[in-house]
Image (cartoon, helix red, strand yellow):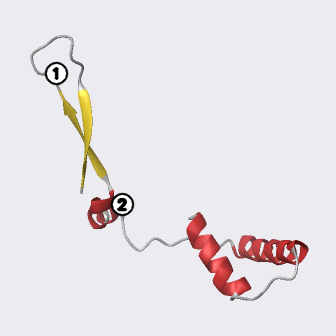
Amino acid sequence: MVELELSIFASQCLQDARIPSPEVLQDITLAYESRRNQQQAKIIWTFKIPDARDKLKHLLATPRIIPPHHSHSEQWRCECLWG
């Protein structure tokens, strides 16, 4: 969500402009924050969690628990399978 807000901020406020000083940037940021809060801006997700998991499954790891082989001295292991 932070990335979305930063992207919106950059496109609506900064627009590749040069900011002359940190104080000006702070003023711009505070004005933007105040406006977004007054608007009660919300993110409207266009898909449900199962759809997101399916679409992004290549980015998610699936844990696999591996029991010890034969020796009692070995411990259980966990591996992550990607996609």
Amino acid type of the residue tagged 1 in the rendering:
Pro
Q: Tell me which residue sits at (76%, 71%) in the image.
A: 33
Calculate the distance from the C-alpha at mark 1 to the C-alpha at mark 2. Answer: 35 Å
Question: In screen coordinates, is 69 left or right of 22?
Answer: left
- Drawn side of residue 33 relative to residue 74, left or right: right
Q: Residue at x 16, y 21 (%)?
A: 68
Which of the 4 image quadrants contains residue 13?
Answer: bottom right
Left or right side of 58 for 1? right
Q: Of the residues under marks 1 and 2, which one precedes in the sequence?
A: 2
Q: What residue sits right under mark 2 in the picture?
A: 49
Residue to which mark 1 is pinned = 68
The quarter of the image holding the N terminus is: bottom right
Q: Can you give x and y, in whole percent of width and height, for residue 6 in the image?
A: 64, 72
Q: Which one is in front, 59 or 69?
A: 69
Q: Quadrant of residue 39?
A: bottom right
Which of 5/58 is in front?
A: 58
